[in-house]
Amino acid sequence: MSIDISSLNASAIRDSIARGDFSAREVADAAFARVESVEGDVHAFLQLAPELAYDAADRVDASVVAARADGVNPADVLPALAGVPAGIKDNMNLIGTNTTCGSKILEPYQSVYTCSAVQRLLDAGALPVGKCNMDEFAFGSSTENSAFGVTHNPWDLTRVPGGSSGGSAACVSAGEAAVSLGSDTGGSIRQPGAFTGTVALKPTYGRVSRYGCVAFGSSLDQIGPFGKTVEDCALVLGAIAGQDPMDATSSDVGVADYAAAARTGAREGGVRGLRVGIVTDLLAMDGCAEEVRAATVRAAELFAELGATVGEVELPSAQHGLSAYYIIGPAEASSNLARFDGIRYGARAEDPADVLDLYMRSRAEGFGPETIRRVMLGTYALSAGYYDAYYGQAQKARTLIKRDFASAFEDFDVLLTPTAPSAAFKVGEKSQDPMEMYLNDIFTIPVNLAGNCAISVPAGLGVDSGLPVGVQIIGDYFAEDVLLRAAAAYEGAVGFDSRPPLVGSL
């Protein structure tokens, strides 16, 4: 059977398998056929995992057969993501694959255990298509910093898909997978979601276990999903959320029925009475393209038309988010990357003169330029004499940002901003200007510093660029159900087709 995998979302795939329209193995066939047809142009994956995917598909198909033999409707017993092809960012461990983090220093490393979020995704029936390309150690906003080549945006192959989770976004956009997992430290899920026209969710810090995800900034990182629809992301979040004894920072706050929340929002009147605050001071910031600003204003108007109460709010300390982040993030990265020394695992320099030479050469040869830049920045910020002046001040700014969000959520249920200041830029356009690249996360970074949840939803195509533009909806701590309800209502009002025209001709 020929299945157009690029046109099906997660729930459609699961329901079709339950009905017997096709098998999970046929879905796997379609996914890998799709990868073969487009991957040469997109380069979303660093490694494919057909053996793991087909094993997972066979388990789903066996469950369907067993249910029917028992006189049970398979739809009543199949897990939420049964037979759904999924991409996994290559900073998440999965037994049977390498975990490279897009870096030469980890190129030979084979996963010896599986990331908790990935295991929960597999337990929900997903088919692991492969490991997705990313900026090295998640340092970047374009996936140009990968040691293994650039990922291209399926909407325009001359443009970047965003980063650092660019491969995870691109594989969903190109129809190679229905959902994927990324990680978000300062916008690395939401910004590529905006660039590729996919729905992209960063949960509340602690909502999803980070165990088995290679750390960038331990107080900032959070795993989250990409999907074709808000409901897709809700289904994935429902599968991976919850406390994990392997991660002391994971929360024991109860997991809501996120898919039900999304379906509620999609109904008529689903957000009636919801309080939506458009963040005016961020919207007015220099560097925000007019088409992005217009899309955000239009989003506020749509919420009002849907019955929400819309007002204006300011986050005065958020303007300092970028500065604070580029002290705190590199400082934590400097500490986390100290373990990559050429001794315990990964690549190591040959014929070192002594231990110090082994350390220095292994890191110099294994790390790329952006990784070295951030490690140096972080080490400097943590050094004696500069800790209080830089790291200490950045943490104070972070506290003020958290207070601003807390104050805003006293009056509003969700907040509205752009996701990124522009549509996707061309490959190479900003790679020689780190500061220009860093500005891509100006709207997303404050959310990570505060720890809130947020989602990027496609707002349609920019009137000037003709490329996808994303709107960011921000929720209070552990209010993902409210966030998804708002996002699904907005998604329905926009009616954006997430499949790029290029998908059919790649």
Image: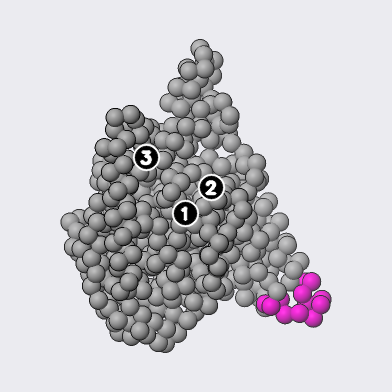
Give me the disc on residue 213: 2
The image quarter containing residue 495 is: bottom left
Kind of residue at disc 1: Gln
Question: Tag 1: Cα neighbours inside 10 Å, few (<14), some, or many (≥20)?
Answer: many
Which numbered circle lies on residue 330? 3
| Residue under the image location 24 percent in, 69 percent down | 313
Kindly indicate whether the residue at mark 1 contacts the one at mark 2 (C-beta within 8 angstroms).
no
Q: Position of residue 16 (x, y in %)?
A: 63, 75
| Viewer-proximal residue among 29 and 263 | 263
Helix, strand or loop for disc 2:
loop
Mark 2 and mark 1: span between their CA atoms? 9 Å
10 Å crowding of disc 2: few (<14), some (14-19), many (20+) = many
- Location of the N terminus by quadrant is bottom right
Residue positioned 65% across, 41% down in the render: 112
* Residue 413 point in image, percent of width and height: 36, 74
| Residue hosting label 1 | 222
